Image (cartoon, helix red, strand yellow):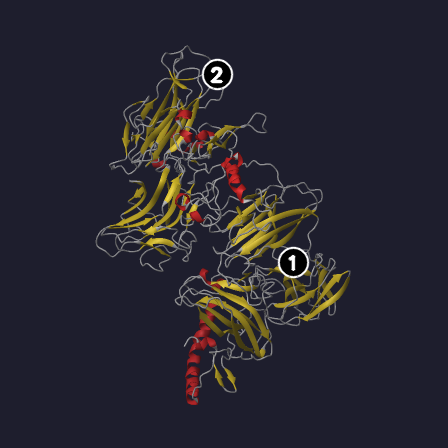
Amino acid sequence: MPLPGHLLPILVLFLAGSPGWAWVPNHCRSPSQAMCNFVCDCRDCSDEAQCGHHGASPALGTPFTCDFERDPCGWRDISTSGYSWLRDRAGAVLEGPGPRADHTLGTDLGWYMAVGTHRGKEAATAALRSPTLREAAPSCKLRLWYHMASGDVAELRLELTHGAETLTLWQSTGPWCPGWQELAVTTGRIRGDFRVIFSATRNATHRGAVALDDLEFWDCGLSTPQASCPLEHHHCHNKACVEPQQLCDGEDNCGDLSDEDPRTCGQHTATNFETGLGLWSRSEGWARNHSAGGTEHPAWPCRDHSRNSAQGSFLVSVAEPGNPAVLSSPELQASGTSSCSLIFYYYLHGSEASCLQLFLQTLGSSNPQAPVLLRRHRGELGTAWVRDRVDIQSAYPFQILLAGQTGPGGVVGLDDLILSEHCRPVLEVSTPQPLPPGPWVPAPGPLPPSSRLQDFCQQGHLACGDLCVAPEQLCDFEQQCAGGEDEQACGTTDFESPEAGGWEDASVGRLQWRRLSAREGAAAAGHFLSLQRAWGQLGAEARVRTPPLGPSGPSCELHLAYHLQSQPREVSCNFERDTCSWYPGHLSDTHWRRVESRGPEHDHTTGQGYFMLLDPTDPLARGHSAHLLSRPQIPAVPTECLSFWYHLHGPQIGTLRLAMRREGEDTHLWSRSGTHGNRWHQAWATLSHQPGSRAPYQLLFEGLRDGYHGTMALDDVAMRPGPCWAPDYCTFEDSDCGFSPGGQSLWKRQANASGHAAWGPPADHTTETAQGHYMMVDTSPDALPRGQTASLTSREHRPLAQPACLTFWYHGSLLSPGALQVHLEEGRRHQVLSLSAHEGLAWHLGSVDVQAEQAWRVVFEAVGTGVAHSYMALDDLLLQDGPCPQPASCDFESGLCGWSHLARPGLGGYSWDWGGGATPSRYLQPPVDHTLGTEAGHFAFFETGVLGPGGRAAWLRSEPLPATPASCLRFWYHMGFPEHFYKGELRVLLCSAQGQLAVWSTGGHRRHQWLEAQVEVASTKEFQIVFEATLGGQPALGPIGLDDVEYLAGQHCQQPAPSPGDTATPVPVPAVVGGALLFLMLLVLLGLGGQRWLEKRGSCPFRSDTEATAPGFDNILFNADGVTLPASVTSDL
């Protein structure tokens, strides 16, 4: 019922005052407030589209990334000279020693921002500026990758401008390392608008080539308003929620400073060094300083922590090892039983020898106590201020000592020392009291042997006996000292010693590594490293490292034992809440990730939920494989069925495998290779166990990539007791798919990898290699007497809801292999097909129409012919909905209909794909098909944007067809390229034992239309039709589509009725004859060179060494009214 107009204002006021609605954020505020603040205020994230964000709404902490693949993401060149930035890839625009590949894809097709070689004779700076960004959180981090030819640039600089101030986040004058280099800097809390500028400066002696790629902003968004906060969290004035440890820590985590409100933090004692040292006392070596005015020291902090400004002050030291600078607190007393807490921010940059240590000095005891080491941070941590906190409980007064020292070129800094309200300065020394019970931070053990030096050795050298071992000889895997002191604390450890083998935590985030002891009552005692909560604010990862090691030999290995604690969980999972019992393997830099449906990538369960994704470009993978493993499982029954849905899409997809791991050995259960279209497919695998066995096992999905163009996905994994139905698709690569041979077991699964198999094809049909598997039966008289049969019976197939087509590939020996009969069993057996196997080197396609309302089986029977050295082989069985098509004909509504899209390594390893306009795709494709003329239709297509400038191609091949004097090939094609400069090319080849022949080709940039083509086909030998997609110009994004392919055997093509504007122009007869003779002469030359070129591009499965010299095709079609030249010739002239 419509709401009366007079009630609308009342309803608005009610909702505004309702506690349940008051704090729900407005999802799309005005653009000036909402744009580029690292938070998706609009539901479609349109407010962040020009700030490096592309995709679904990100969670807090997800990076905003610009990879420059589609556009510059709002980054602009602001250079004032000819030395400037532009978007480029692999030297397509700029000349000079730029990168051969981008960082995102790792190929010559990826985009980046680059500055080309500058030909000027004066110094110049090229500056690239970000769009206007807003409100960076204190934890905000910028990560990017840059590339530079050695010596090409005088200086690189990364700056941040906000208000009237410009902060230098990073600068370097080299030396530069080869390849792409990573740079990560923190911005700190930035209020209001700001911009980031990356600049490269060249002088007269430098050419100045530099490139930039993959800019990422991490953890930059402030917390969004919430109606309520989790337990113990702080509710800010702006209704954001922050964790309790972020209160009164000197950082604006709320975004409105309410977590640092004096009413909450007034009892804390904070020293920010802006006006002095406060309560703290310093020794020589510490100096209060700031960044304004510049400094000659390259590692000097560019800003303080308190104000995040070059005008702010901090303490800094360059004290050398052995003579640390010490900062002392006043004498303090922890009040009551509460802990006295100290929060402090430290800075270590410029030297791996930089070290900051925090000691506790107990006072007032009758027995003087040595200082106890509570914290030690050392190494190179970059240009960031890192937070730490110590909690102290003591019955006696105490002092806190902060000691800093560094190596050559290093700097140690301190800022924002904050004592909690329970730290009371001591005016009078109190009477000693017993130590109250409570947690206590144990002191780390003694320093490694390298620090226990004798007076006669130089600083940093190790004294052992009469030797002084230089620092570079420590931990080099070569023992110098008789007792091995120089190789102690060098990484080898069982963590029983407090020295822990020299391993030290180097974390700067919310997690850290600590040495712990096993809990009482545990099965085994001892010590180990454990992941624990930490006080750092920069990221979530934890790092632990050894002292500097090496050099090492090429066979050096690291062995360790690790433990991941979790509860046993089910294998069955739809990934909507979590990953259940599944977890990614760690032996590669490529990982399966649980992701939410977004854009062209959607889950199978609901279309809007979660699934497991393997994308080799996010992040860029160096390894070739990635594992997804289940937790160990105990068999419930002797036979189990695992079902799952998989998605393999892309022109360089690779292989997805399923294996069962038991006692360290893997048993392959299932695999698929190549693209399977932009849709989900279901698969089954039967798991067999020994009856009564309780041996645990794991399931393992392994993704093996062929390149970077394609993704793999998994969803809706389910386990049930009992065997699976027979699979709809069987390649015999991993198993016999449940087929059982007859009584004598004459059918065998085999491969010809050794080349010495007694019988069988030299290569399978699936992979077209000797390593591929198939089923084979020996039909020679010794194994199968003449007239007798050998049967191969499938496992039961599930009942069919509609008619289906069962296709299979078969191969016979050169001499009389015999007959192959196909039977269907649905209660009773009846024969549906009988084939006399073709002689030759090729696999042939067979098909059977199937209708079955009950469970059914398929039976293959080979009939012996009494001929020696004969065999019959089977491979690649496929069951698809719908009737079987005619040979080499397809409307692509249910699949590829026997057309093979196997990637050809000689052509670059790319594949045609199958899809439809209704399903969003990351690859360009026609919007509608030709068959239906709607988005619901399907077609075959190839996106040429993945091809490089080397002229590589992709093939779509028909089944082998019998020789024909004249037949017609009709098809519809679609080409969409953005400009005349770019030219895709579609060719039709005939491939036989005589070689390859181009009979038709076209190229162009036509858009949004399907065009019809007809090709006359003639061959004296068995042949295949090949559609080849390639490029005739510069690499460009553009699809080539195919639909409604029809092969009319024994029929001539009928010329289509001319459309308006297609009328022919009369040509004089002498011109026709003269032109024909000229073309004939050119044809001979083109034929000789063209055949040579085609032979290099690919190979036909028909060809053998004895047939390689056979005469080629007749490339001229003589008609009654003249000479017709193939389109492939006329289009090139």
Name the secondary structure under disc 2.
loop
The numbered mark at residue 307 is: none
Judge the density around disc 2: few (<14), some (14-19), many (≥20) Cα neighbours within 10 Å. Answer: few
Q: In this view, does 706 lie above or below 504?
A: below
Residue 890 point in image, percent of width and height: 59, 68
Q: Residue furthest right?
A: 828
Q: Considering the image in quadrants, where does the C terminus appear?
A: bottom left
Residue 481 seen in the current view: no
Residue type highlighted by circle 1: Asp
Q: Is residue 459 above or below residue 970?
A: above
Q: Please state which of residues 1126 and 751 is positioned toward the viewer in this rendering.
A: 1126
Residue 533 seen in the current view: yes
Q: In this view, does 743 lie above or below 305?
A: below
Residue 33 point in image, percent of width and height: 40, 43
| Residue that numbered label 1 is attached to | 728
Tell me which corner region of the image, top left, top right, bottom left or bottom right, holds residue 827.
Answer: bottom right
Residue 1090 point in image, percent of width and height: 44, 74
Residue type highlighted by circle 2: Pro
Tell me which corner region of the image, top left, top right, bottom left or bottom right, holds residue 895.
Answer: bottom right
- The answer to whether residue 1019 is left or right of residue 134 is right
Q: Is residue 652 above or below residue 693?
A: below
Judge the density around disc 1: few (<14), some (14-19), many (≥20) Cα neighbours within 10 Å. Answer: some
| Residue that numbered label 2 is attached to | 436
Q: Which residue lies furthest to the front in this view?
A: 6
Q: Which residue is drawn at 28% across and 28% down?
A: 288
Q: Please state which of residues 306 and 347 is positioned toward the viewer in this rendering.
A: 306
Q: Please state which of residues 387 and 4 is positioned toward the viewer in this rendering.
A: 4
